[in-house]
Amino acid sequence: FSSEQKLLRCMENLNMNQIFPRRYFSHNWNILTKQNLNDQTVYQDLASRILCLPVNVQFGAQPILKVMETTKFSWTQIP
C-alpha cells in the first residue's frame, strides 16, 4: 500500500466482508535488534504497509475471488 492509512481502510473493508487479513510484519523489531537506525526506518516504513491476505489453494475459487474483489475495490475506491 502507498500508506498505512490506506492499508487500515482496506483492512476495515475486508473485515466488514468477513475477511480477516493479518499484519505479520508490523512488529517493532528494532527493539530486538541493534541494526543501523537507517535500516530500521526503512524496515518500519515498509512493514507498516504490508498486509497478508488469507488466500489458500484449498479455499477454492469463490473465497479467493471474494478476497481479490474486496481488495481491488478497496485499492481503487478508498482515497
Image (cartoon, grey):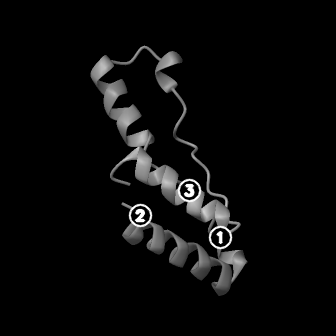
* Alpha carbons under labels 2 and 3: distance apart: 11 Å
Q: Amino acid at mark 3?
A: Met
Query: In the image, what residue type sits under mark 2?
Result: Ile
Q: Secondary structure at mark 1?
A: loop
- Along the horizontal axis of the image, is 37 left or right of 24? left
For this orientation, the residue located farthest to the left is 38
Whether residue 40 can be seen here: yes
Q: Position of residue 74 (x, y in %)?
A: 46, 67
Say the numbered circle drawn on residue 11: 3
Q: Amino acid at mark 1?
A: Asn
Furthest residue in direction top, as rendered: 34
Residue 23: image location, x then y, percent: 57, 46
Q: Position of residue 65 (x, y in %)?
A: 58, 82
Residue 7 % position (x, y): 46, 52
Q: Looking at the image, which residue is at 62% across and 68% down?
A: 55
**How far apart, in angstroms, are the residues tagged by discs 1 and 2?**
26 Å
Q: Which residue is mark 1?
A: 56
Q: Earlier in the sequence, mark 3 or mark 1?
A: 3
Q: Residues under labels 3 and 1: Cα distance? A: 18 Å
Residue at the spot of label 2: 78
Numbered disc in front, either 3 or 1:
3
Judged left or right of residue 39, residue 53 is right
Say which element carries label 2: loop
Indicate which label's residue lies in the foreground, 2 or 3: 2
Name which of mark 1 and mark 2 comes first in the sequence. Answer: 1
The quadrant where residue 70 appears? bottom right
- For marks 2 and 3 on the same chain, the one whose residue lies earlier in the sequence: 3
| Image height of 10 relative to 4, above or below | below
